[in-house]
Amino acid sequence: SSTVRGSRREFGWAGSGFCPRLHLVTGATEGSFAEMSKEKALEAKAKGNVEFQAGNYAEAIKHFTEAISHDPTDHVFFSNRSACYASLGKYKEALEDGSECVRLKPDWPKGYTRKAHAEFWMEKYDDAAETYKAGLKLAPEDPALKEGLRKAMDAKYELPGSGVGSAGAGSGGGGGGGLFGKLDPGALAAAAAKNPKIKEYMKDKDLMSKMQMMMQLGGSSQNQQQQQLLMQMMQQDPRVLEVFMAMQGIDVSTAGADDLMGESGSAPSRPAPKEEPKKEAPPPEDLRTPSQKEADEFKAKGNELYKKKQFQEALEMYEKAIEKEPNDLTYYNNKCAVWIEMGEEYYDKVLDLCKDLVSRRYEINSANKGGASFEKVAKVFCRMASVHEKRKQYDQAIEMYQKAQTEDNSKTTRNALRDVERAKEKYEKESYLDSDKAEEHRIKGNEFFKALNYVEAKKEYDEGLKRNPKDPKLYSNRAAALTKLLAYPNALTDLEECLKLDPTFVKAYSRKGACHFFMKEYNKAIQAYDAGLKLDPSNKECAEGKEQVMHKIAEVNRSGTVDEEQIRHSMADPEIQNILKDPQINMFLKEMQENPAEANKALNKDKKLQEAVTKLMAAGILRTG
């Protein structure tokens, strides 16, 4: 059919000099497409920023909402409103705005911070962690994203320092429930341990009394007056702000003025007091008995031999250490480490010895105080966990790591637990893979599809993809079922995945074109069908699909009515937005209204204009006649 041969011929110009009279669809835009009331939007945003800096979050939300009404394509407006909602503890709304910000500007790291922050305080820790990871792919060194990911992972296991308050997400903290969130005394001690400057500040009684007042205000429901008081304290004594930022995990030695004072603040006027030189603490008194000192010497020799992979000799040294001090778990644990390196035939010996040690922990501790401390018992549990992990007995390994956590909740154990959980998930997925069974599910799905039972067909395709997530046919077939179930966006996601796996899968382009057609995204439908026809010019499905789209565009054009749904979809399309922001296109559209004859001449001579007009007509933005 000639209607599918070339977009310029389809719309009436093919170099003959004839061009139909074009006009803009009424209501599709107001004034310049490129501007879209941007000036009004920026004015509203400026007002919102002022209210936000003053702590008037409800008023700021009104202004940012107005900005969005003028220009719903600016990601910053959604980001700012998300921050306001979070400050009021309205995390559901904050998440919605954060998600929209990411959708509009997926390459902007701060959007992921906004989204993840809301997910964190809604206790969606897994989601928050994934969002932070996505942001770190764009900005690997971003301190807010790195700290957020750490807290999200810690909060998943309800660990201290994660920033989660006992009252739950609604109690504030971490930036929610008030301007300064929750101030944790434990976090202050942790900050002092990491930063000598903060440790020096803690010696100042006046400063600590101010911090105590901030903690009392920060832990309560803050009103505007309290927030202003806290801000005033920070401005009077910059050290207060430095301590506060350190408690939030921010390195104040590298933070800039914007980090410390916000966009509207000024840099601290008073310099912080100079640090006093650190005094070296005297070494602790050695309280070991002579036999314990000898045991430690043998252990040190064993460790060196272990590093050199001289395992038999290392065992001999650890045995001598045990002879000198039989009531210390450390030497036994090191002996188990050597056994593990010596091979699978020693794994049972490791487990038997570790179980015996745990059963005698109190007896050992009575004979040698600290010989079976919580920390040492935790390491024994970790040793057993490593054996189970090597045997791919992941449930038992997880159980051992969890027991280790109850003894000593160390960062090493937490990381090991996370790693084994990921290893288990990966192992189970890989163990489940079976291309033959995947093909069986695909065939069953096809049978259900032919019987018009699309729900059961989708279930079979789901199971098939679990068995073989690299089969493009399964994605394409599931997309067909989803299309029949009117789940067009989900179908498009599957088709994109299908085409990633096999860019030459023509049927996927045909189905993609159909999805866009049903969503009234006629411009995208044409592009999908064209891509399929480029691969296979004789493909009947793509040819007929494109012809159907062209007839629909002509029908809508003749009707004289405006399809608001089509216009809405078109105006949200980044490609259409870019066309409308192009200065050359804007000049053409203006010329088209003021001097149609000259516009038509320009159109006949310029291929770029012809392609742009073709897309705008398919999108319903331009009409003929």
Image: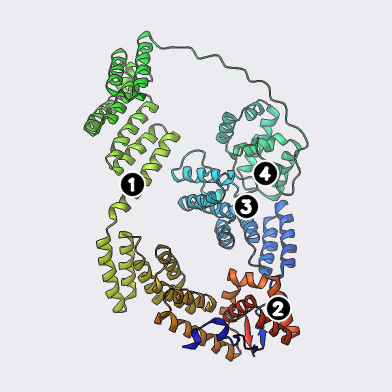
Determine which residue is flagged by label 1.
Answer: 424
Q: How far apart are the alpha carbons under marks 2 and 3? A: 46 Å
What's the residue type where badge 2 is placed?
Phe
Q: Quadrant of residue 370?
A: top left
Three-letter amino acid code at disc 1? Lys
Residue in the picture at 59% in, 63% down? 104
Q: Which residue is mark 4?
A: 259
Of mark 4 and mark 2, the one earlier in the sequence is 4
Is 366 situated above or below 459?
Answer: above
Residue 87 image label: 3
Query: Which residue occupies the foreground of this view, 198 or 406?
Result: 198
Please name the amino acid that badge 4 sits on: Asp
Between the C-alphas of marks 3 and 1, the distance is 38 Å
Residue at the outermost top position: 290
> Which residue is disc 2 drawn over?
588
Q: Secondary structure at mark 3?
A: helix
Q: Earlier in the sequence, mark 3 or mark 4?
A: 3
Q: Quadrant of residue 601?
A: bottom right
Task: Tell me if I can see residue 67 in this picture.
Answer: yes
The amino acid at mark 3 is Ser
**Label 2 or label 3, whichever comes before in sequence order:** 3
- State the residue at coordinates (32%, 53%): 429
Query: Residue 526 appears at what percent x and percent y?
Result: 51, 78
Place of residue 559 in the rendered image (x, y in percent of width and height, measured from the top left): 58, 91
Residue 569 drawn at (x, y percent): 56, 75
